[in-house]
Every structure is written in C-alpha cells, then in structure tokens.
Image (tube, rainbow, N blue to C red):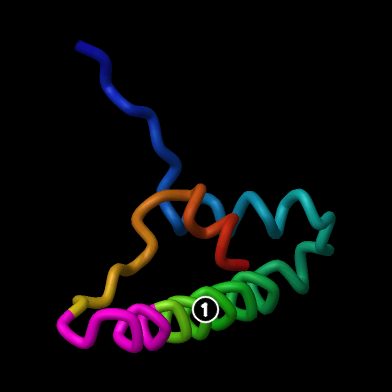
Amino acid sequence: MSLPLAISPAVMVNRKVHEAGAPPQASLAMVALLRQKLMLAEEAEAARATRIDPEAKPHPATTGAEVDRLI
C-alpha cells in the first residue's frame, strides 16, 4: 500500500512566489495576491459546478496540484 504525496496549498503558493524571484520586500504582497487569485478561482469553480449540479458542494483546493491548476 502506498501513501500519496501531496504539497499543501500554502506551500505551493510560497513555492510559486519563490520561483517568481520576488524580492524579499515584495514576497508577502505576492503571497497575498496569489491567495486572492486562488480564492477567486475557487469561487468561480464552485459557481461553475453549481450550474452543472445545483446540489454540488464547494470543493476547496486541498493539494498543490489544484493550486497550480487554478492560478
């Protein structure tokens, strides 16, 4: 039996900021901007899901792969 490895959404956001090469003074602002983009993308995804299935429950990003897909 294997254990799936996953990166948490917070770690993925920080990783994206680090890969962007943001200066240390701007890192916190970039993290906040990416978190906002992630929240907006999750809301849009939930709205799209409810149009398809009105009883669908919102599904927040739980892995880094979902964060990468959304933002």
Looking at the rendered image, the quarter that the C terminus falls into is bottom right
Could you tell whether 30 is left or right of 9 in the image? right
Instruction: Please tell me whether the stretch drawn in magenta is mainly helix, strand or loop.
Output: helix
| Residue shown at 84% from the left, 55% from the top | 21
Q: Position of residue 33 (x, y in %)?
A: 64, 80
Looking at this rendering, what residue extends furthest in the top direction? 1
Magenta residue span: 46-55
Q: Nearer the viewer, residue 51 or 7?
A: 51
Q: Position of residue 46 (x, y in %)?
A: 36, 81
Could you tell whether 29 is left or right of 22 in the image? left
Q: Which residue is mark 1?
A: 41
| Residue shown at 21% from the left, 77% from the top | 56
Q: Nearer the viewer, residue 70 or 12?
A: 70
**Taking 36 as reference, is 68 above or below it?**
above
Q: How many marks?
A: 1
Q: Position of residue 19 (x, y in %)?
A: 76, 49
Find residue 30 and report its image quarter. Answer: bottom right
Q: Position of residue 53 (x, y in %)?
A: 25, 80
Q: Circle 1: is it few (<14), some (14-19), or many (20+) Cα within 10 Å? A: some
- Amino acid type assigned to the residue bearing label 1 in the image: Ala
On whether residue 50 falls in the magenta region, the answer is yes
| Residue shown at 44% from the left, 77% from the top | 45
